Amino acid sequence: MRGARAERRAVPARGVALVMVLWCAALASILAAGFSFSLRTEARLAAGVVDRARAGAAAEAGVRRLMAVLAAGERRKVEPVAASMTFAGLTVQVALAPENSRVDLNAAPAPLLESLVAHVASTLDIDAPAKDIAEAILDWRDTDSVARPAGAEAAEYEAAGLAARPRNSAFLSVSELTRVKGVAPRLYQALEPLVTVYAWSPQVDPMSAPRDVLLALPEVTAADVDAFLAARTADPGDRRAVTALAGAQRYLARGSGTVFAITARATTASGVTAVRRAVVKLSGSVQRPVSVLAWFEDAPTVEPDGAGDAADGVPAVGG
């Protein structure tokens, strides 16, 4: 009888042991699954870091390649470029455009600034006082503290309850335009791709300017711009096409200047993209023919209108 009772006590003990073993096995499985998931996550993160590094290096290589092209051909006429090249197995889209293809906030005359703001406001269908904003831009960049009739200096900013005050010197970046009296966020977003602070030219190069910049020129119509663009597309090197913009001749530059924007965009097979953009200046120095004025990472891609692909995917400076 004592043996039977001992056997009955042993059965529950074995059951408890079995449950414990099962729980331990389940826990081990959960820990193993978590460890495996952690390894996979870390592997994906590591792969993402590697892909970002590869894309960034390829994009930077694209910018450096175009800088070398500029340096090699700086004494010749520089044309806009939109092309592809390959670095370390990655395709890189590159673009080169003169900075004076846009309106310079530091050099543009009042009529050009006013016409630009009026055009953008009209496109957005918003009520923006173009003359007031143009004169506020001029007051921001000039060296005095005397407001123009429709402009704004420190007193006008204070009266409007604005924390900003005019710099009374050159714009250091396009983003500084957000602090100018009258420039609302939506207006700035539309103006931003059409303006620059690096060209230091009161005029715009029509042979590389985008359509919206051309439409912003004083005394031209949409029909004038479309006629010009058709002629420019047919023969990108023929400057006689500018006769279609006869009313705006005083706002048109005769050449592309010496400052250029270079943009490169690289994408890996996994979809990771890196963009590098540099603003560079041809210096004329044999030792350092190209100098970098500004460098941007993950910048918006800018491609010149009407630029063709370079032969064999290699950009060239044309004569």
Image: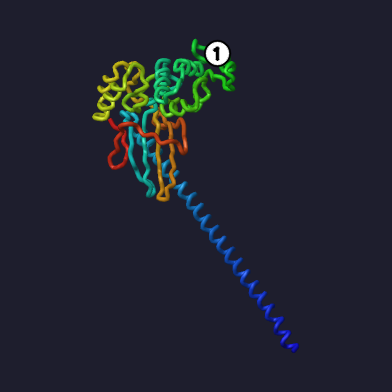
Q: Nearer the viewer, residue 52 or 124?
A: 124
Locate the C terminus and report the quarter of the image it occupies. top left
The kind of secondary structure element at disc 1 is loop
| In this picture, residue 226 sits left or right of residue 297 | left
Task: Tell me where residue 80 appears, x and y as whole percent.
Answer: 33, 32
List the residue tagged with mark 1. Answer: 145
Instruction: Give the residue furthest to the front.
Output: 1
| In this picture, residue 246 sits left or right of residue 185 | left
Locate the N terminus and report the quarter of the image it occupies. bottom right
Task: Tell me where residue 264 appears, x and y as whole percent.
Answer: 40, 39
Task: Tell me where residue 280 appears, x and y as whole percent.
Answer: 42, 31
> In terms of image quadrants, where is residue 22?
bottom right
Q: How has the structure been colored for display?
A: rainbow
Q: Amino acid at mark 1?
A: Ser
Query: Residue visible at 31% across and 26% down?
Result: 207
Q: Nearer the viewer, residue 67 or 122?
A: 122
Task: Tell me where residue 34 appears, x and y as whole percent.
Answer: 57, 60
